[in-house]
Amino acid sequence: MWRTAYRTSPKTGERENGDAVLVRRGPEAITLAVIDGLGHGRMAAQAAHAAVECLNRLPLTVDLEEAMRAVHEALRGTRGAAAAVCQLGATPTTSPGAVSFVCCGVGNVEIRCFGAKLPILLSPGVLGARVQSFRICRGELPSGARLVMFSDGISQRAPLDSLRQQDPESLCDTLMREHRKPDDDASVLVCDTEA
């Protein structure tokens, strides 16, 4: 149903990675997350891993706004983080050949969708510190759609349209090799929907 790949790497010269990626699969659902702890190094890594741990404790089909609120609370007392979280799955109301799509992003993370027009609006703020509201995007992804999520360690100017033909693994490698900023932690996650 889904083909996924991801890469994550610490800032050049750092041992600990302040970015984290989550790919959590169930029989008919998947949760994807890219988390960017503020700054870099040990304290950023602690915040990012606390967010992953929180998401792993929640049911796979938890309401996404509830999940984001839980992560926000779990990160209080840490440096905080930006995060993009997406849930994909089959529902009784989903069109044939499509999967439901729910996403929320807070801070300077990116969620790009190819093969479907979805109004993805990110919420300003920092999880664990301040978020006024969680903007939730809902829709459907047809078979063959691609979701690309990345932290601010990947250039927003990366030519994703021209790289569309690459498989998820190759796209992750290309983005990390050619569009990564060496002065920051970097993560990219690619998910293709399949019939």
Image (cartoon, helix red, strand yellow):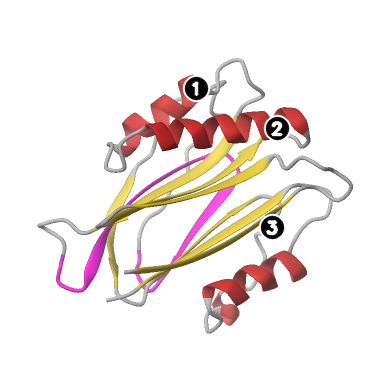
Q: Residue at x 84, y 43 (%)?
A: 14
Residue 164, relative to residue 73: is it above or below?
below
* Residue 73 falls within the magenta-colored stretch: no
* Element on which disc 3 rests: loop
Task: Name the residue type under label 2.
Answer: Ala
**Residue under numbered circle 2:** 44
Give the side of residue 10 with respect to residue 110, left or right.
right
Task: Name the residue type under label 3.
Answer: Ile
Which span of residues is magenta-colored? 95-117
Task: Name the residue type under label 1.
Answer: Ala
For marks 2 and 3, give the one nearer the viewer. 2
Q: Which mark is residue 74?
A: 1
Q: Residue at x 65, y 59 (%)?
A: 156
Please, which residue is most extreme toward the top here?
Answer: 77
Please, which residue is most extreme toward the front here?
Answer: 27
Q: Main secondary structure of the magenta part?
A: strand
Do callouts 2 and 1 mark residues in contact (Cβ within 8 Å)? Answer: no
Q: Which mark is residue 154?
A: 3
